[in-house]
Amino acid sequence: MPPSKTRVVVQTAPRALEMRDMPIPDIDEESAILRIEACGICGSDAEQYNGVIEVALPLIPGHEPLGIIEKIGDKAAQRWGVDVGDRVAVETLIPCGHCSTCIGGRYNLCRGRGDRLFGYAYVPLSTKPGLWGAYADYMYLDPHSIVHKMRKDIPANIAVMFNPLGAGFRWAVEMPQTGPGDTVLILGPGQRGIASVIACRAAGADTIIVTGLTSDEKKLALAKEFGADYTINIEEEDARKRVKEITNGRGADVVVEVSANAPEPVAESLHYVAMGGRIVLAGVKGGKPVPNFISDLVVVKEITIFGALGVTSKAYGSAIRLIESGHVPIEKMHTHDFPLEQTELAIQTLAGEIDGDSSIHSCLLPDLSA
Ligand SMILES: [Zn+2]
Ligand SMILES: [Zn+2]
């Protein structure tokens, strides 16, 4: 049985977080209470913290929960195939199940069922019962939750990497249908870029190239450890020329754009991609327009451009199987653990705001403060 109260971290304004205690509610037959073991921190946490992503405050952030089912209603247990004591990976989205995107099989585009009820970390405290985020010891699981049972013998800070790896599988493999014979170029060596390398390797891609900046030196080296064949420092090398050389003049079959903030790589991707190639845009640019985007290249090269928002169950499943297989030393991309009290530091470290410290994958571990 869960205790009667939980610690939570509440965002009250941009760049303002505070620790509070909140009551843990009773649940009905269709919902559950999760004890958080770990919550992953990703680029969108920093955007939410800085007020770039528009949310209704106050709320509890944290959209990458991993935890143990502490209490569950009979119907939920039956529907989800899990019971008290099971470890589950929780998907961010809480789809309504009835709108045209849900019915069309693209539930990641669902806008929810009112009261901003569409995904963990984005629902305000004013929507009952308020415990909608994983920056906490306990979280409420809505009847529309999607959960994946996971083995419990993997350390929580590693198991929680189902999030970036799921993104790697969806964005770099599933959407552009990457497979044997493909050369993949990944723009940006952050946690999503490295996860893309791991996913493309698992999918059997022939050649993997990763670009980055001088300040990304360590991340580029890690990308190679995970199976990238080439890395390009775009500040020191002519990236267009290098991609041509590596691909015998053809260009990359697949380009995955996962760099943060700067819009220039989006325009460059049109030059890197092969005739008939596929480009996946997954890094958001704060609403900035893309200078020098030559749309003629899309036409004359018959390029297919995908926009990627979120992750879906199939890709999460691939990520979880890869983690559970133990075949890939994914712990090498895990750099930081933080207790709940240091949530702001965790976000600032991931965002690169802390001098001399650089993170690839970070997470909150509520148990660290116990
Ligand atoms: Zn995330
Ligand atoms: Zn829907």
Image (tube, rainbow, N blue to C red):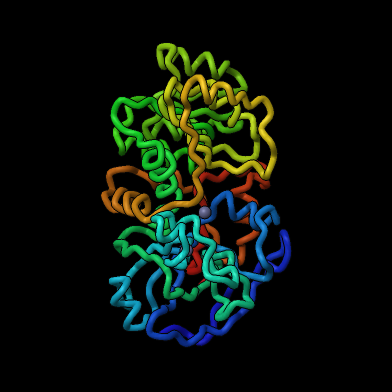
Pick out the residue farthest to the front: 100
Where does the N terminus fall, quadrant-wise? bottom left
Please state the horizontal and vertical placement of residue 45, each as a whole percent of the image. 59, 55
Q: Residue at x 64, y 78 (%)?
A: 126
Indicate whether 283 appears above or below 368.
Answer: above
Say whether residue 310 is left or right of residue 169: right
Question: Where's residue 237, x and y in %?
Answer: 57, 17
Q: Quadrant of residue 2?
A: bottom left
User: Quick check: 220 left or right of 80?
Assistant: right
Q: In front: 268, or 195?
A: 268
In the image, is residue 352 above or below residue 62? Answer: above
**Where residue 301 sits: x, y (%)?**
48, 21
- Which residue appears at 52% of the width and 35% of the height? 257
**Total marks placed:** 0
Residue at (60%, 40%) from the top-left corner? 260
Q: Nearer the viewer, residue 269 or 152?
A: 269
Q: Residue at x 54, y 21 (%)?
A: 271
**Please, is residue 327 above or below residue 303 in the view?**
below
Question: Which image quadrant for residue 295?
Answer: top right
Q: Nearer the viewer, residue 92 or 332?
A: 92
Quarter of the view holding residue 17: bottom right
Q: Position of residue 367 (x, y in %)?
A: 48, 69
